[in-house]
Amino acid sequence: MGINPLDANGLRERIQTSLDAFVSDHRPLMLGVSPDTLPLIESLEGLLVGGKRLRPAFAYWGFLAAGGQDTDEVLRACASLEFLQACALIHDDVMDASDTRRGQPAIHKQFETRHAVNMWKGSAKLFGEGAAILVGDLALSWADEMLLTSGLANDQLLRAKTIYDIMRTELMSGQYLDLLEQVRGEITHERAETVIRFKSAKYTIERPLHLGAAIAGGTPELTKILSDYGLALGEAFQLRDDLLGVFGDSSITGKPTGDDLREGKQTMLIAFANGNASASDRKYLFDNLGNAALTIEEISKLQSVLISCGAQDFVENRITSYLDVALESLDALSENPEAKAALVELAILATKRSA
């Protein structure tokens, strides 16, 4: 289509402008409560700068695929998904005890440092986690408010809110299943698929597409096409994320090398290794996965285990297969060449990325 669909029609710039305006409008209310709440706003603002903007983009192109016409009101409704994503990231970092996010200290670490610098009483760690949970809750609240005050017509809001409510329930369910797998261990292929589908595939791609299409009054036939595309691409997107969490370049991902290995993430990579690695490699994986003090040498050995047993190749091949399914599903979108071209390009961007 000649231009990155994340930037077509000024998309990312307009999303950032909408988010900045929303936060700015709420700053007086927060400061009216107390100037001490300013760090809540500042930490959220910092997280909202940048990011891929995939969820608003999929909602936007789902809207255009359904025949909608670009308006600022629709853009604000799509941009509200960034607040939901911020909530998910903040809470995810607390649950995973991740120190960094996008190359910067995670929100809970920011508040932990604030506690230590001011030499406040009690546990800096607990303060940091508690403050981060509240920032995440604030983001979740603002996501709802931004959608409902976007300026859409009432019938559009009703259709959008129905999808939005389903998406949030699926996301929280998927997040819990992911949390459960970390403590249960010995993840299987089937359980890994379930986590991928509900933590990422539906939330990142399918439901945003549905939300945009619903705003435009899309048909059930279009919804089916978007589901076929979104679920396959969503699975590929998360599998790429899993590979980056183990093999990614920290200078690009903004997360420490092998961070998922230190956190003990139970992913499709681990599920494959559980069933295909040698007995000695499985034991090494079991003994070391989830050790927060892993050395670079130990991380390198774990990476070698996942390569030698075929887990890395298996996941790469699944990404390719899912991408093929997603692209083939768009053949039925021939009546809207602009939206089709954008969704094709988004599929490539989502699966070929390095961060």
Image: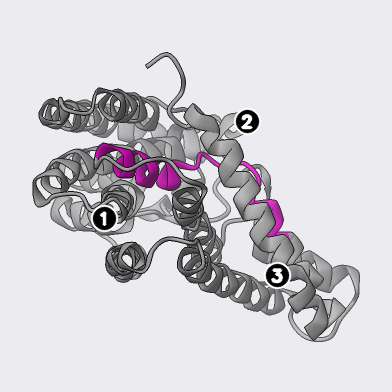
The CA span between labels 2 and 1 is 39 Å
* Residue depicted at 52% across the width and 48% down the height: 72
Q: Position of residue 144 (x, y in %)?
A: 47, 70
Foreground tag (2 vs 3): 3
Please name the residue that numbered disc 3 is placed on.
26
Q: Please determine whether, in this image, residue 310 is positioned above or below residue 165.
A: above
Seen from this angle, which residue lies furthest right?
A: 118
Name which quarter of the figure residue 226 lies in.
Answer: top left
Q: Is residue 45 magenta?
A: yes
Which secondary structure, mark 2?
helix
- In magenta, the rendered stretch is 43-65
Q: What amino acid type is highlighted by mark number 2? A: Ser
Which numbered disc, 1 or 3, marks the residue that appears first in the sequence? 3
Question: Magenta span: helix, strand or loop, mainly?
Answer: helix
Q: What amino acid type is highlighted by mark number 3? A: His
* Residue depicted at 49% across the width and 42% down the height: 53
Which secondary structure, mark 3?
helix
Q: Position of residue 296 (x, y in %)?
A: 57, 37
- Label 2–label 3 contact, CB within 8 A: no
Seen from this angle, which residue lies furthest top?
A: 2
Q: Residues within 10 Å of mark 1 (few under 14, many from 20)?
A: many
Q: Residues within 10 Å of mark 3 (few under 14, many from 20)?
A: few
Please name the residue that numbered disc 1 is placed on.
214
